Amino acid sequence: MSSAWRRLRWVPLVAGATALLAGLWAGLARLGLELPGGMQALSEFHGALMISGFLGTLISLERAVAIGRWWAYAAPALSAIGAVALIADTPAFASGAFLLAGIALTVNSGTVVVRQPALFTIVLAVAAACWIAGRLAWILGAEATGVAGWWLAFLVLTVAAERLELSRLLSPPRSSQLTFAMAVALIIIGAARGEFSGEAAPFSGTGLLASTVWLVRHDIALRTIRLSGLTRFSAACLLAGYFWLGAAGLLLLVTPPGTTAFSYDAVVHAIAIGFILSMIFGHAPIILPAVTGLRIRYSAATYAPLFLLHLSVLLRVAADLFGRTDLRTITGPATIIALASYAATLITSRRLASRKQ
C-alpha cells in the first residue's frame, strides 16, 4: 500500500473520532447536563453516533486495511460520510449512508469468507449483517431500544469472532465451535425478538452469558495475563471486558430492560463501555500502528485510565440499579476523562519514544 493510500486512511479515522467526540458530548446532554454547542439536539442520536459513526467507521476501516484492496475502503468512507451528515443534523441522509456502509462491510466480510471459509469469518459477516438489520429498523421508524439488540450484536459478534480466530493458538476441541455457534444464534434470536425493549430477554441474556463463558474458557488472555508489558495490559483489558459482558447477560435475565426505569441503560453501557471500550483500550496499541503507520510505545501509565473506565461503568450500573440519577450524572464525565487520559498516555509515550530514538 502506497504512502498516499495510507494518508487517506486518516479521513475516515478523523471522521470517526469526530463522531466519538460528538457522541460523548451528546451523551452528557442525555444525562441532563446543560452544555453549549447545540449538542442537546443531537442527544437523541447518541447511540447512532457512537455505534455507527465511531465504531462502525473504525471496524470498517480495520477490515479494509486487512483486505488491502481499494474497493474495501468504500465501507469506512460511507460510514464517515454518515457520521459527518449526522453531526450536520441531516439524519435521513446519514441513515442512508450508514445503511450503505453496512452493506459494503458485509460484502467485504463475504469476500473474506470466500477466501477463507471458517466459523470466525462467517460470524464476522453475520455481525456486519446485524448492523444492516439495525439500520433498516431505524429507518423504518423503530425506537433506539428496538434496534439496540442488532447494533450491540454487531459489536459483540465482531469482537467474539476476532477472539475466536486467535483461540486457534490453543487448539480448542471442535465441540467448542458448536458451543460458540449456539451462543451466536441466541444473540441473533434475541435481537430479532427485540428483547432490549421487552420485559423478558431469555435469548439475549443466555447468549451473552454463553459467549462470556466461551471467551473466558478459550481465549489466550488467560495465559497472556501472566506475561508482562503490552501483552499483559491487553489481556487485562480483555478479561475486564468479559466481566462486563457476562454482567450484561445476567442483568438481561434478572432485570430485563422493560422492567425498571434504568435497567436498559445499565445493560447497554455494561456492553458498550465495559466490554467494547475495554476491547478498544486493549487493541488500540496494536491496531493503530497497522492502520496509521504510527508507532505506539506501551506505558504502564495506561492502567490508570483503564481503572477509571471500569470504575465509571461500575458507578453507572450501580446508579441505574438503585435509581440514583445524581450518581449517573457524574459517570459520563468520568468515562470521558478515562478516554481522554488514555489517548493522552498513548500520545505522550509515542513522543517519548521518538525523542529516545
Image (spheres, rainbow, N blue to C red):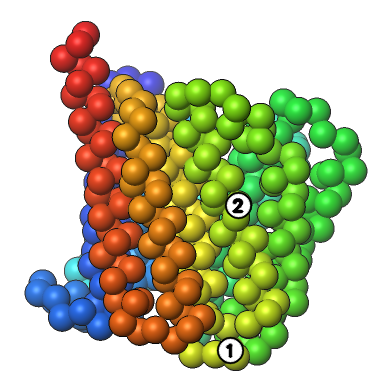
Q: Is residue 297 visible?
A: yes
User: Quadrant of the image for the N terminus?
Assistant: top left
Which amino acid, mark 1? Answer: Gly
Name the residue rendered at 64%, 48% in the picture: 160
Q: Secondary structure at mark 1?
A: loop
Q: Which residue is mark 2?
A: 242
Given residues 272 and 134, the one toward you in this image is 272
Q: Is residue 226 left or right of residue 184?
A: left
Q: Which residue is mark 1?
A: 258
Given residues 51 and 81, the one toward you in this image is 51
Q: Residues within 10 Å of mark 2 (few under 14, many from 20)?
A: many
Horizontal and vertical percent position of residue 97: 38, 63
User: Quadrant of the image for the C terminus?
Assistant: top left
Q: Residues within 10 Å of mark 1 (few under 14, many from 20)?
A: some
Name the residue rendered at 71%, 34% in the picture: 167
Horizontal and vertical percent position of residue 127: 61, 55
Which amino acid, mark 2? Answer: Tyr
